Every structure is written in C-alpha cells, then in structure tokens.
Amino acid sequence: MQSHAAPTQREDRASPAPGGRPAWGSDLIAEALSATGVTHIALTPGSSFRGLHDSLVNHLGSRGPEILLCLHEEHCVAIAHGYAKVTEQPMAVAVHSNVGLMHASMAIYNAYCDRIPMLVVGATGPVDAARRRPWIDWIHTSADQAMIVRPYLKWDDQPASVGASVDSVLHANRVTRTHPQAPVYVCLDVSVQEEPVTSAAEPPPAARIAPVPDAVPDPAAVDRAAALLTAAARPVVLIGRVGRSTADWARRIRLVEHLGARVITDAKLPSAFPTDHPQHAGAPAIFLGEANGELLRRADVVLALDWCDLAGTLRSAGATHSTIISAGVDHQLHNGWSKDSFGSAPVDLALPCRADVAIAALLRHVPPDGEPAATHTAGTGGAACALPDPPGSADMITVPALERALHDATLGTQPCLIRTPLSWDGRYWPQRGPLDVLGHDGGAGLGSGPGMAVGAALALRGTGRLPVAVLGDGDLLMGGTALWTASKHDIPLLVVVANNSSFYNDEVHQRNIAIARGRPVRNASIGVALDEPSADLAGFARSLGFTGFGPVSSRGDLPTKLARAVETVQAGGRALIDVRVEPGYAADMTEALTKD
C-alpha cells in the first residue's frame, strides 16, 4: 500500500512575492479567474495557455485556484463535472487549443446534458497570422474555435484584448452559475496572454459579478397549482433535477407528505427523495417501468419538477390525460442542434422557475403545523420494503449481489455513490439524503465515470463521506487513467468495477437484432466481449497509485475484499476492486435500452 503523505499541487507551488503587481496580460486574466471564486482548475498542459499557466503558478500562487494535473482533457472536464454534482459550484478547466477542445468535447456534452456549471478556458495560437511560428501555431489555430462545441455550450467568447479577456472570464462565470446551468467557454489568444501590462484595473466587487437571481413564479399560477394538487385524489410528483441542500430535501418531503402524493424519481439523476419513504413508488430506474407507469396512468394530477424527458415519460405510460403541472427553466437552454430538449410535453400549467423554488412557493399553501394528508398505499414500490435477496446461486456474483455486499460493507459509514452501471438495481441501495447517489453523466456515453469519480471524491474530501464509484469495465478501460489524478492530489476514493468482460449493453442489442433477422444468437459477443486478453484491472490500478484488489469471482470472497477496500479509503487512501459479475442478470435492466 502506498504512502498517503504525498504533497498536493498547492503545496508544490511557489507563492507570489508580497504585493506583486500584474506584469503580463495573463496575470490579469488569472486574477479575474481567481475573482470568480473557483477553487480548482483542472488542466492538461498546453503551449496555447502557457502564459495563463505561468500566471496561475508564479503570479497568483496560493491565492488562486488549485491546479489539478490530468492526463487527458476529457478527464479534466469529467473531474469538473463530478465536482459540481456534489457542490453545485463550477470548477475551472483549461484545454489546449483546438486539439485539446476536441479531446474535451464529449465530456463537455455530458456536462451540458446534465446541466452542470463549468468555466472552460481554452486558447488558440496567435490570431494575427504574422505572429505564428512555422507549422505548430498554424495547426493549433482555428477560426471560430468554439464552433467545435458551441451547440452544447450556454455561452462562449473569443476576446481580442486583455481587458476584453478579463470581462469575458467574469461574464462567463455569471452565465454558468445562473440557472439553467451549463458549461461556458472562453478562448484566449496566446499573444494576448503574453502582452506586457501597461495599466492594471481592479476587477469589480464580487457582488457586481454575481449570477442572476432565480426567477420566481407568478403567484396566481402557484395558487392555481396548489389548488389542483390539494384537490387531487391521486396526485403524483415526478422529481427530476433538484438541488443538493438538506433544506430543499426536507421541503420536498414536507410538500409530498401534505399532498398525500406518490413520488417517482430517476436513476439518471442524483438523489431527490428518500426511496424508502412510504410515498416513494418503485425504485429509481433508467426507464419508467411498468409499476410506475401504472401509477402515472391512474394519476389525476402530475407535478413534474424539472423532469428529464417529460413528454417521453408520459407517452410511454399512456398518461397524457392527467392534468400536468411542470416547473423548470430548462426551456431557456434548448437549441436546434441538441435534441436533449426531448418532445413537446402536454403541460396544462407551467411554473417557469427552478424546481426547488416552485416547491418553496407551493409550501406557502401548506399549514406550518398541519397534519399531512393520508398517504396512498396502493402500489407501494419495493424501495419502501426491506432489501430483497439478490438473485443467482449462492456463489455467483450478480450485480444485485455486488450491490448488497457493497451496501453491507459500507454500513456504519456515509457512502456517496458517485456512479453506477446501467444494470444497477435501485432496490438494493436506499437513498436517504441528497448526496447518497449522484446519478449518471448526462450524455450516456462511456469513459466519463473515472473522471467524474475523481471530481466528486475531491469535493467530498474532508466531509466524512465515503466516495464510492461502481464502474463498468468498459468505462474504466476507456477513461481509467483519470484515476492517476486522485493519487497525484491525494484524493481518497473507492472504485468498484462491475466487470462482465463485455460492452454488455451491445450484446443485448446484437442478440435482439440476430433474433429479428433469424441469425445466430451465439455470435452476439463478437466485436463486443472484452476478453482474450482479459485486462489486469487491479494491476492497472496499482500502476496509478491505487491499492488493487481482485479479480474477485466468488460471492464468498466478496465481503472480505470489500471490507479491506473500504478500510483503505477510510484511512485516506485509494482502492480499486475488480469484481467479476455474471452478465446474464443484467439483461432485465438493459433490455429496455434496446427496445424500439
């Protein structure tokens, strides 16, 4: 086991000279970045922002955001994504010219779809062609560089002077922090960064660059919504994108209890409501499921709180006849390129504000000391019951068996489940607080899990919570070098690999296509299975500074290995355990992803 006393990047840095004045354009840009309040900047070094890099290290020093060194730009953005899922605050990211931005593009799309605030700072070679070095500056300079990612940004800019660059960074911070939140991008000219400063201006006070306050709903609309909900015989609340605060969590419970409503939550999103509460319906899942669909079909009034794909959910349930109240500001972000706006939902009453703002407004109609309405009991989901026994033989490790063993191994701790594979079954992992589970990545690709795990673990460091990420083997192999940053910066983290030796979701696709076409099902794993060779994931983790365990292929060995891994992380270390799971028991959970 490696030592946990490695110095952090902040400890490695020199401090600026007392009273040092900005001498270069990038010094002023760095000061603007510091004025935004971001505490960290994740980067993979690049010559296009060499001036800014120098200013962060040698001008700001310990006054500025802490540098997190990463091995790939996609990891930089994924780390910032995971950090914001815990803190609801943006991290800064620096990416090198067009090539770094292209590396980062998938992760930026994830953050956009997940509505994550993030301040991405890019750079370009000299815009003035006369100042470009032969070859390298030409291929690292683009006209309208942000065009690469603009369809999934909230705002971007390419300022042409030092003063404009300072203003752009400050404005970008305001935009990304204002709801609906999403990444922003500022592209800095390398020549502007390296201009000598002739006069320096102080950035405006923080209060003058603050995000725009939340919109509040029309009181008449709130009155009407409250009247509809309190008069409903079978109200259902769909809780989607909501905040992480414990106060908002408590308000959601109070509103639901007083309405006597049933609650449905979404496994793609962070914890939003206690899943073992008697008014919570079926366990959170990627798709609605038949039990929750029946609940929606019976509902007379539905309150959708920034629900992801409201139109698709109602249509799949056949519940478009209900009176629909929808709260959210996501419509302000929709554009013609990305179809993550989903279909047009049949909404009878819109509350154009954040979900938690709508709840606070609706609670004005709830007597402060009144008794909750009677809770409906029909169709109570499994999440309100005792944990079921996992399927499979006594020694077979299914994903549910892994879940149950991990749940038992973390008893007595406060785990934060940062990430789960698609086959995760929410019945085996009750959610009782806003940081219990963080959901998925937004864009539903692969490779983001390791970076998001590191970012969330950074945000949780020192809080007493145990950061746990359950990753698929494909996700780990694609983005696994992101874990090096956790070791470099001494970030405790537990990674559990649900290793089915396959990109298994595509096996289900291939099997279904073969059946439909009358072709051999036995060939479904060709071009999909991750075997021959089977990667040594524990050895890979050790090479990145983690304590590696496994492979574990027996259910009987699992508790001991998980306990040792948990102990390692509680002691301040990092651990990865490779668990070989039976893929067949993931079929029920992934089948919905392959249906028409």
Image: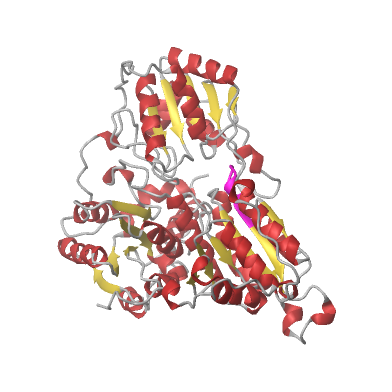
161 sits left or right of 438 in the view? right
Picture quadrant where residue 496 is located? bottom left
Q: In the displayed structure, would residue 494 be above or below residue 419?
A: below
Which residue is painted at 36% across and 33% down in the image?
A: 250
Instruction: Look at the image and tell me whether residue 330 can be seen.
Output: yes
Check the image and tell me how it is coloured: secondary structure
- View extreme (bottom): residue: 134
Where residue 63 sits: x, y (%)? 51, 66
Q: In the displayed structure, would residue 504 be above or below residue 323?
A: below
Q: Nearer the viewer, residue 579 or 149?
A: 149
Q: Nearer the viewer, residue 301 or 154?
A: 154
Where residue 267 sits: x, y (%)? 41, 44
Instruction: Look at the image and tell me whether residue 158 can be seen.
Output: no
- Residue segment shown in magenta: 176-184
Q: In the displayed structure, would residue 454 be above or below residue 47?
A: above
Q: Is residue 555 magenta?
A: no
Which residue is painted at 24% across and 77% down in the image?
A: 1
376 sits left or right of 221 in the view? left
Picture quadrant where residue 557 is located? bottom left
Q: Nearer the viewer, residue 315 or 232?
A: 232
Which residue is painted at 29% across and 74% down in the image?
A: 4
Where residue 158 sits: x, y (%)? 74, 62
Number of numbered discs visible in the structure rendering:
0
- View extreme (front): residue: 19
Where residue 116 sits: x, y (%)? 54, 51
